[in-house]
Amino acid sequence: MGLFSRKKRQEAATADDVDTVDGVGTVDGADTVDDGDGLETSAAADGTAADETAAAEAPTAEAPTAEDEVEGVRTGAGAETASASGDQDASASDADATADEKAADEPVERGAHLADGPYDESDAPEEDRIDLGGLQVPTIDGMELRMEVDQRTSAVTGANLVIGGSSVQVQAFAAPKSRGLWDDVRTSLRDSVVKQGGTAETRPGAFGTELITRLPVKRADGRTGYRPARFIGIDGRRWFLRAILTGKALSDTEQARAIETVISRLVVVRGGEAMAPQELIPLNLPGQRPGLNQIGASPLDPLARGPEITQIG
């Protein structure tokens, strides 16, 4: 097992790190995770710096709303034309998204590199794992485990697993008995990214339909770059597991398969207590018994500012 580290949320961060996920179904660029540079620089960034700074946290249908990106209002004769054009663009975007969803929903044969998980605790085979409370992580040589801790509440809000320049942040949430959460969460994530000027597309993946995003962020030198990420959602037995891949695994097939293997060996410990849908399943540090105040936010906004993806080390 590699290095274990603990890091509290930083109040300020630069765009040279990765974007955050606010709640279960939104994305913003406020907090960060350390996955190396990884920014895709925009060639037109220098001429549009002022426009790029307008991006802010975007709301979802279930989470509390935040400030949207603000654009100038067109007046006079051009207003109707702009509105009509905007409606056409929106319709085209919706049509593309629907086509992407249909293509991504096509079944994909499960890869031989995957175990049968992620597992519910009742179905998990025997294996050496690190107990994090709501999640159990397999022990893998060379893997670093980095825990996310909310500075305000001291609650553990997520786990980052780092392997050879690739990182995956994993979190588990409570879900209803009757249906899964990934379809709704994926739609909210896509809408959030698009509202901030990024791109998001669905595709079939190792665990079903995935979401690939590129979110614009401001670099320290003032230029605009794009931060790519791969979102995986897995609906389980009254739980929902979300994994966010960054780093080399986005372009390196071998590293992607290694991360996917780890995800397939995770165990979710939902517990039998009543929990609201989308409420974060409590985590604890390795070897530490859970405290009494693991979660201090409301069920629809389980982490207040999101899962506290932070720069570590």
Image: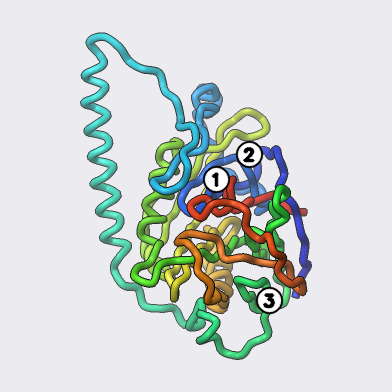
Q: Which badge, 1 or 2, comes first in the chain's sequence?
A: 2
Residue at 41% across / 61% down in the picture?
210
Would residue 222 be seen by someone viewing this image from the given angle?
Answer: yes
Q: Quadrant of residue 159?
A: bottom right
The front one of 202 and 243 is: 243
Would residue 261 be seen by someone viewing this image from the given angle?
Answer: no
Residue 288 screen position, x and y as percent: 76, 71
The front one of 69 and 17 is: 69
Estimate how packed mark 1 is, as few (under 14), some (14 to 19) or many (20 or more) residues with alpha carbons within 10 Å: many
SS at mark 3 in the image: strand
- Which numbered disc, 3 or 2, marks the residue closer to the eye? 3
- Against 295, is 220 above or below? above
SS at mark 2 in the image: loop
Q: Which badge, 1 or 3, comes first in the chain's sequence?
A: 3
Which residue carries the number 3 mark? 131
Residue at 55% across / 82% down in the picture?
121
**Residue 162 horizontal side relative to residue 239, left or right:** right
Quadrant location of the C terminus in the rendered image: bottom right
Q: CA distance from mark 1 to mark 3?
A: 31 Å
Q: CA distance from mark 1 to mark 2?
A: 9 Å
Disc marking residue 15: 2
Residue at 40% across / 62% down in the picture?
181
Q: Evaluate if marks 1 and 2 touch, with contact meaning CB atoms under 8 Å apart.
A: yes
Which residue carries the number 1 mark? 227
Disc marking residue 199: none
| Residue type highlighted by circle 3 | Asp
| Residue type highlighted by circle 1 | Arg
